[in-house]
Amino acid sequence: MATTTDSAVRAKTTVDEVAALLARPLFELLFEAASVHRRHHDPNKVQCSQLMNIKTGGCPEDCSYCSQSAHYATAVEREPMQAVDEVVADARRARENGADRFCMGAAWREVRDGAEFDRVLEMVREVKELGLETCVTLGMLNDDQARRLKEAGLDYYNHNLDTGRSHYDAIISTRTLDDRLRTVESVRRAGVSVCCGGILGMGESQTARAELLAELAGLDPQPESVPINALVPVEGTPLADVQPLDWTDMVRTIAAARILMPRAVLRLSAGRTEMTEEGQALCLFAGANSIFVGDELLTTPNPAPASDAALFAKLGLEALQR
């Protein structure tokens, strides 16, 4: 197959084209992805982000992968929303430990106006004052709520598409993919940057993976931030016993995402604890240029800071500083 140039990346890439990209010989795919990455990003800089759960558990959605769903009996217990000063203290520690971006997640199906949303707005304002890039993930929202987040200083809104359209109903029944896309449109209209990606290893076909990437690459404009997650199976959820993701699938998806979305920040997100250093290194070579630091990603484990520092030292990488 002929190589893909940046100019050949169209606003709408077909599923068949993405499937062909994912099926290319791995070294060819890696070479092109790394070349695209170097045209648009510093290959030796990686943004470090930290994610904090500001409201845990009790979510009414039935996402089959999620430990925080009220539909499943998991070890995660419902907790009230964190106080603003607790969140700001966590953000300050994250900054001191080298994080450039602070993300706040609430286990909500959708944003509801009121005291809790007002508290989130205050969190955004105060974290932004620390000089950190700000991101929240709160579920579905409307135009007015997106506007208020923008006015508070929000940089990014995370709202993942999760999986491809053909596999969506097998993973979630309480919302549709189009529900997700409507929220992304509200975020975009408010002038907030979009953080939108998905999860691999949920029993999806290669076609479903191609659908996910085609949907993301076809957003106009494309997302500024694209998290690629590997499923972390959680006991008590329907996906607790799913087969582990092969490391090459993660590398291929990162590489294809880099080719399709050259300017996006690609975030190597959940599932890093199950990857070897070599697998993570290939993902970073292929174009991933952000990782999450800290002990947990919401409710799932994350590599220890010392192991990330050791990996960066071996690869000659540096944490991006604003």
Image: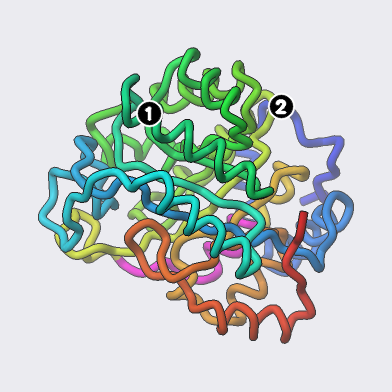
Q: Position of residue 40 (x, y in %)?
A: 85, 49
Q: Which residue is mark 2?
A: 11
Is 245 colored magenta in this rendering?
Answer: yes
- The residue at 19%/54% (across/down) is 238
Q: Nearer the viewer, residue 43 or 243?
A: 43
What is the span of residues highlighted in magenta in the rendered image? 243-254
| Residue 281's disc number | none
Main SS of the magenta part reads: helix
Out of 183 and 136, give the one closest to the viewer. 136
**Relative image position of residue 60 (x, y in whole percent):** 19, 35
Q: Secondary structure at mark 2?
A: loop
Which label is found at residue 117? 1
Kindly indicate the quadrant of the structure image that contains residue 295: bottom left
- Residue type indicated by callout 2: Ala
Instruction: Classify residue 159 as left or right of residue 216.
Output: left
Q: Quadrant location of the C terminus?
A: bottom right
Mark sitting earlier along the chain (2/1): 2
Q: Return the residue nearer the eye: 90 or 39.
A: 90
Q: Is residue 314 left or right of residue 242?
A: right
Label 2 to label 1, Cα distance in Å? 34 Å
Q: Amino acid at mark 1?
A: Phe
Any magenta on residue 279?
no
Residue 15: tell me if it is visible: no
* Callout 1 crowding tier (Cα within 10 Å): few <14, some 14–19, many ≥20: some
Q: Residue at x 52, y 20 (%)?
A: 148
Q: Position of residue 75 (x, y in %)?
A: 16, 63
The answer to whether one can see residue 241 in this image is: yes
Question: On screen, 314 above or below 140?
Answer: below
Numbered circles on residues, count: 2
